[in-house]
Amino acid sequence: KCQEIVDQINSGNNNSLEFQEFPLFVHNNSLLKEVKIPHSCSVIGRGAFFDCISLVNVEIPPSVIEIGPSAFFNCKSLAKITLPDSIISTNASAFNRCYALAEINIPYSVVSIGRHAFVWCNSLKKILLPQSVRTIGYCAFFGCSALEELKYFAYIKDIGDAAFPTTAKIIKY
């Protein structure tokens, strides 16, 4: 069933996908534009949408608690994503090289932002890390050249080296 869906998308007859089963990995698909993840899903797996360069819209339900490593790596067209309040962590390289990503909410449920999570998200301008965040991984926001301001609370216990770009105004509360 999963392979039938991927084959249908790859044929060019459909550019959106509503999951019936998960995890389904549609990595390296240049035609996929929209994804609606089902409520039965709790984790978006490693590399699930890796290199889906045309992906613009992802609907994530509140059942999802984790964004796996490299889940949206190199999704160049993804400009905005709304994470549900259920998300606990964004793992390593989760949104790495999402060049168009200009807006992301990081909900109060997030406690960990993995290494390279938002590396080279060149369109991000402002980030507010909620007080729930306890760890920020190595180079988490490295290369975010448009980032003007990043605010975080003093509750963070571990901040990895080069976590923030040197050009951004970093505000600690």
Image (cartoon, rainbow, N blue to C red):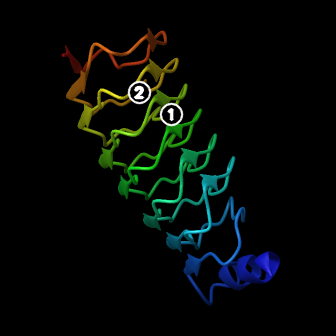
Q: How far apart in space, not on screen, are marks 2 and 1 (Cα)?
A: 7 Å
Q: Which residue is drawn at 37% across and 49% down?
A: 101
> Label 2 amino acid?
Phe
Relative to the observer, which residue lies in front, 90 or 140? 90
Q: Residue 130: horizontal and vertical position, in percent?
A: 29, 32
Q: Residue 74: horizontal and vertical position, in percent?
A: 55, 48
Q: Please tell me whether residue 89 is drawn above or below residue 173 in the rendered image.
A: below
Q: Based on the displayed image, in which of its 4 quarters is residue 145 positioned?
A: top left
Q: Please tell me whether residue 137 is drawn above or below residue 49 in the rendered image.
A: above
Q: In the shown orientation, is residue 129 left or right of residue 7?
A: left
Q: Residues within 10 Å of mark 1 (few under 14, many from 20)?
A: many
Question: For residue 108, which numbered disc appears in the image?
Answer: none
Mark yes or no: residue 41 visible: yes
Q: Which residue is drawn at 50% across and 41% down?
A: 97
Location of the C terminus by quadrant is top left
Relative to the observer, which residue lies in front, 15 or 129? 129
| Callouts 2 and 1 close, C-beta under 8 Å | yes
Q: Residue 86: horizontal and vertical position, in percent?
A: 45, 50
Q: Residue at x 30, y 40 (%)?
A: 124
Q: Name the residue under label 2.
A: 141
Relative to the observer, which residue lies in front, 91 or 65? 65
| Circle 2 SS class | loop
Q: Residue at x 30, y 30 (%)?
A: 129
Q: In the shown orientation, is residue 116 left or right of residue 8?
A: left
> Label 1 amino acid?
Ala
Question: For residue 117, which numbered disc appears in the image?
Answer: 1
Mark yes or no: residue 73 visible: no
Q: How crowded is mark 2: few (under 14 residues within 10 Å), some or many (20 or more)?
A: many
Q: Residue 100: horizontal and vertical position, in percent?
A: 37, 51
Location of the N terminus by quadrant is bottom right
| Circle 1 SS class | loop
